[in-house]
Amino acid sequence: MHEQTRGLGFAALFAVAIGVIVAQSTIVSLLQATAIGGWGFVGALAIGWALMMANSATYAELALMMPRATGIGAYIGAGLGPLPAIFAVFAGYVVPALFGPAAELLLVDAVLAQLLPGVLPGFGWAALLLGVLVVLNLLGTDVFARVQTALTFTMLVFLLLTAATGLAGSPTAPAAQGLSAMGADITVFGIVALVMYSLIGTEFVTPLTGAARDPARHVPRAMFVGLTVVALANAAFCLAAVAAVGRARLGESPLPHLDVVQAVFGPGARLLFAAIAITATASLLNMVLGAVPRMLMEMARSGEAFPVLARTNARGVPWVATLFVAALPLVGLAWAGGDIGRIVPLLVAAAGAWLVSYMVAHLALLALRRRAAGAARPWRSPFAPWPQLLAIAGMGWVIAHAAPAPELEGPVFTALAAVLGLVALIGTAWVRLVMRKPLFGATVGDTPNTGVNPP
C-alpha cells in the first residue's frame, strides 16, 4: 500500500486477500447460516463464491489497469465520476467499518470476558486490541504486511485443524443433533447474505498492486486462490461444527465458535481459543486499518474528501485517516448498545453495504471497457461483460433478500438505508458545492495518479 514497499510475493498477497475473511465475525456468520439453512448453506456458499469470483475478476482488471491507485475510489472515479467514487468508498469500506469491526470487537470482548473474567473492565479487551493495531499500522506498511501474513496463516491452520479433528469424530458430539439434522428445514437463498459476509474482501489486495513482485500474475491468483481456499476451509469447518455441537446449538449460542472449539478439543482449549479469538479479530481490524485510510487519503488528494485526511506521518502513513477509521467501530458499538445479540443484523448490514459498492465497481469496469477501450490492461476479466452483469443482478437480489429472518428485516434495512442514504446525500452536496463538478460522466484521466492511459 505504501509506495516504498517493493517485491511482495504471492504468499504476502494471498494473506492480504483473505485477511478480512478469516475473522471471528465471518466464522459466526457462517455458523449462524449453517444453523438456519441446514444443507442449504452449501448452495448459499456456492452462490456467494461464484459472485465473489466475478468480483475478484473485476477488481483484478481495474487494479492492473491502474497500478498506482490505492483503491476503489480511483477506479470508479475514472469510470463513472466523483459521486459514484465517493459513494462506493464510503458504502463499501467506511460504512462496513461501522458494522463489521464493531461486531468483531463485540465478539472478542465477549469471548475474553468469559474466558478471563475480571481481568479488564467491560470492552477493555476490545479497546486494548484496537489500540495496539493502530500503533502497528502507524509504523508503516512493512509492519502491516508481516503482521497480516502471520495472522492469516494462523487462522487458516486453526480452521483446517478444527475441521479435520471435528470430522474425525468428537466424543462430545450429540449424535441426534449431528449431521443428520442438516436435512430438515433447508434454506438456500435466505442465508446468502450471511454466507457472503464470509467471502467478502479479497479486493483489499489491489492497493498493493504497485508493490507486487509480479502483479499481473500474483494479484489475480491471490484473489482467486484465496477465495477458493477459504470457501473450502469454511465449508469443512461448518460441517465439523455441526458434527461436534449440533445444528440447534449453533443457532442458539451467542458464541457458537467457542462452543465448537470446546467440543472438539475439550475444556482445556479455552486459553488456546482466547489466542485464536484475538488473532481472528486482529486479522480483520488490521486489514481495515491498513487499507481504508489509504483509500480516504487518495480521495482527499483528489478533492473528494476533507484535505486533513491526506496528512501523513514520517513513514507515509495517513495518520488522521487511520485514527478516523479506528473510531468507526466505536460508533458501531454504541449503535449496537454493546449487545452481542445484535451481531447478525450488524453483519448483514455490513455485507449489504459492501455489495452495493461492488455493484458500482462492476459498472465502472463496463464503463472503462467502452470509454478506454485502448488503455493498457495487463490482465482482462474473462468473458466480460457477462460475469459483471450477472454479478450485478445477483448482488441486487441478495441485498433485497438479505435478512435471514423476518424479524431482522427492520433492523437490517433501517440501518442500511439510513447510512447509505446519508452517504449519498453528503456525497452529492460535496461534489456540487465543494468540488463544483458534475456528479457523473467522468472521462479517463480525471482522477490523478491512477495510471490510466487514454485511448
Image (cartoon, helix red, strand yellow):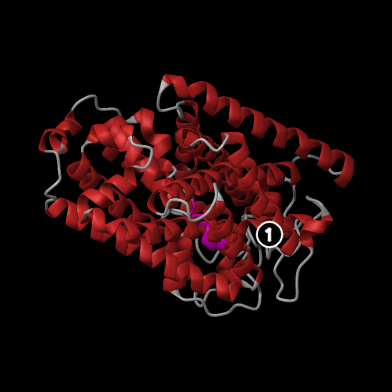
152 to 78, vertically: above or below: below
Left-right relation of 219 to 438: left
Task: Locate residue 335: give its quadrant.
Answer: top right
In the picture, the quarter occupied by the N terminus is bottom right
Q: Which residue appears farthest toward the front when viewing the image?
A: 118
Quadrant location, the C terminus: bottom right
75 vs 30, left or right, is: right
| Disc 1 residue type (three-letter) | Thr
User: Is residue 199 in sight in this rendering?
Assistant: no
Asked where in the image residue 173 lies, by quadrant, the reply is top left
Q: Position of residue 233 (x, y in %)?
A: 29, 54
Please give left or right for residue 280 compared with residue 75 in the image: left
Closer to us: 43 or 335: 335
Residue 167 is a magenta residue: no
Q: Main secondary structure of the magenta part?
A: helix
Percent coordinates x, y for residue 180 in the rendering: 13, 34
- Of the pair 44 and 265, the residue shown nearer to us: 265
Residue at the (16%, 34%) spot, across then down: 177
In the picture of the structure, the residue carrying the numbered disc 1 is: 322
Magenta stretch: give its range.
201-206
Quick one: label 1, few (<14), some, or many (20+) residues within 10 Å? Answer: many
Residue located 82% across and 57% down the image: 308
